Image (spheres, rainbow, N blue to C red):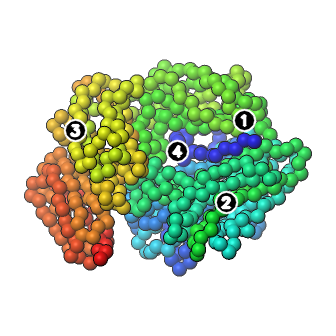
Amino acid sequence: MRSLLLLVLPCFALGLFAQDTFHVVSHRRTPVVTDPHRGVHQYPANVVFPSARTEVRQVLLHLTFGCPDTMRCADWDYLDRILVHRIGTADTFEVSRMLTPYGGGFSKDWHFSWTTDLTDLRSLLSDSCMVIYEHGGYEPNTDRGWAVTLDFEFIFGKPAQPVLAVVPLYAGGFAYGNKARSIEADLPPRTVDMPDGASTLRIRMLQTGHGMNPQDGCGEFCAKQRYVIVDGDTVNTHKLWKDCGCNPVQPQAGTWIFDRANWCPGSLNQPDIVDVPLKQGAPQATVDIDMEPYAVDSSTAEESITAYAILLGPFQARNDVALEALIEPHADQPFAATRPQGNTARIRIRNLGSSPLYTVTVKYGTQGFTARTFRWAGELAPGATAEVDLPGIIDMKPGMNHFFAEVTKPNGKADAWPKDNRRELRFPAPPVYGPDLIVQLRTNKQPEQNALVLTNAEGRTLLDHPLGSLRADTLYSDTLHLQPGRYALQLTDTAGDGLEFWYNTAGGRGTLRLLDMQGRCIKAFESDCGDGLGYGFLVQEGAPSPIDTVPVIGLFPARTTGRTVLDYFANDTAAVTVRILDEQKLVVEEHRYAALKQSVFTYDLGYRPPQRYTVKVLANGREVFSRRLRVVAKVE
């Protein structure tokens, strides 16, 4: 039996389909706030999806968050649902799920987009429907919220595998850990009837853990196993846990780096997919979802589960390959903070044919340069995916570039559906610097968690500070004379809390910057960077290194019993004012510095009542920094 975990589109650039598409936008920057009295607030919108008679190759949902026009972004990580109600029926289905980010530190113009694949649920997305965005939570709703856009993209064409039936299995929040009643009592086996022609049973699951048991943090902060059982056989075992330190929505104001039970703040929950080949002639199948045994006193843990059985017909073609994603180069927002623009191209292909895929021809390149051809060889089962590294350095010119890739001749044969074989995107060339640079790293108090490496396009290491080599609270300045070419700087943090994290005050704060030979800042990196960061750049002889005109300012810790440190670093002197405001926006302290360029200041608000404050910095009268500071009571 074959099982796979669907890890689709949000992490990779979508590119452009060379086929007809149709968009249904149910919500366009709809202001969304909580209902603190009920804990849930629904935002319905009537839509007309393409007719059920229309052939659809793929359905994608694009979700975009931003700050509302008249409010700031909201604060808390709440569970939101995207529901679809079939008008004229009593049926309402959850088709996707969003876990909201900690938006307290986002700027007014912040926005972010995610994508998920809803092709399996196409039969639910047809004709007249009501799309309901359901926002959870209890935070105040008069001054904070989200602007939400839901865009359903229908790509017309013959389905690779017809969906014969969609059968709901489980839907709801299921108590977990209760000694008096096991979760299995609420997750009984389900019997699914097999329609004629069904060849694959697909179990599609949205599952996230919530609640906070004092013993172990369950169900949000505990890793438990989930088992999928079909006809008595365990066909899939999955650990419900997700690394949040690589979350591309970073940094956030709350505990965004803490790993969680199958979700992270600021993520569109991707479905877990398990495919099981069906026995010929079997009239039914029994599907059961079991959880790892777990019981404690007074459990508040809950598993939020929506699961469907999808009955699929056979693949419609023998040889059919799809170019599913352009991974490198990338223009997609989720990669902006976490990885450098690559030197070599990488794509992801999917076998949509009934035969194993052994070979495929790939043509690729950048507009204005000579295209290349590569013959991939391997073995890819029907429905499976593979990431393919394409040889050669990505061609590019300064500014924006246009890249394409196209896959043809699966197993040396004509492709049954060539319209999904090609993708294109526009991507920016990395910034260009002169050959002389200083890489400046100031470590925090836990440097054993960090490593820093600089490599060139050929993979040669030119700067290496491996794990275990760095000392605490130490400034490392590496002067480099680089040859023209491409380079990638990679910072790693094994603890997933970057060079600073507000919750880890014991870890202190570190910084990473690129300087020119006069010590002026060219690029300052975000210290609150979770698992680390990647940064690509070009070096050209004689190129000027652009100087950053905005002061680099850090405030740490942002949660304190009184003392906090402001780190000010600028390339030019300025008249600087630091103002500290209380919750009523009244100035409680003001500090003026007549000609400031670089310095570190300590402020102590221990004499003030515990509450949230705001620290603002103005340079020559212009606000260049604003951050909230929380003063908490001292523990006696």
Helix or strand or loop: what does disc 3 sit on?
strand
Q: In which quarter of the image is the N terminus?
A: top right
The answer to whether residue 48 of the structure is visible from this angle is no
Q: Residues within 10 Å of mark 2 (few under 14, many from 20)?
A: some
Q: Please state which of the two labelled residues, at mark 3 or mark 1, is closer to the viewer.
A: 3
**Residue occupied by mark 4:** 11
Q: In this view, does 192 lie to the left or right of 40?
A: right
Nearer-the-camera pick, 318 or 194: 194
Provide residue 362's location: percent of width, then percent of height: 59, 25
Tell me which numbered mark, 1 or 4, is placed earlier along the sequence: 4
Provide residue 263's location: percent of width, then percent of height: 54, 57
Q: Alpha carbon of mark 2 to alpha carbon of mark 3: how far?
A: 51 Å
Helix or strand or loop: what does disc 2 sit on?
strand
Residue located 47% across and 38% down the image: 330
Q: Quadrant of the C terminus?
A: bottom left
Residue 378 lies in quadrant: top right
Tell me which numbered mark, 3 or 4, is placed earlier along the sequence: 4
The answer to whether residue 463 of the structure is visible from this angle is yes
Provide residue 301's location: percent of width, then percent of height: 58, 68
Determine whether 299 is above or below 429 in the image.
below
Q: Please state which of the two labelled residues, at mark 3 or mark 4, is closer to the viewer.
A: 3
Q: Residues within 10 Å of mark 3 (few under 14, many from 20)?
A: some
Residue type highlighted by circle 3: Ser
Residue type highlighted by circle 2: Met
Residue located 54% across and 47% down the image: 10
**Residue occupied by mark 2:** 291
Q: Is residue 330 left or right of residue 297?
A: left
**Residue occupied by mark 3:** 477
Residue type highlighted by circle 1: Pro
Q: Which residue lies furthest to the bottom in this view?
A: 37
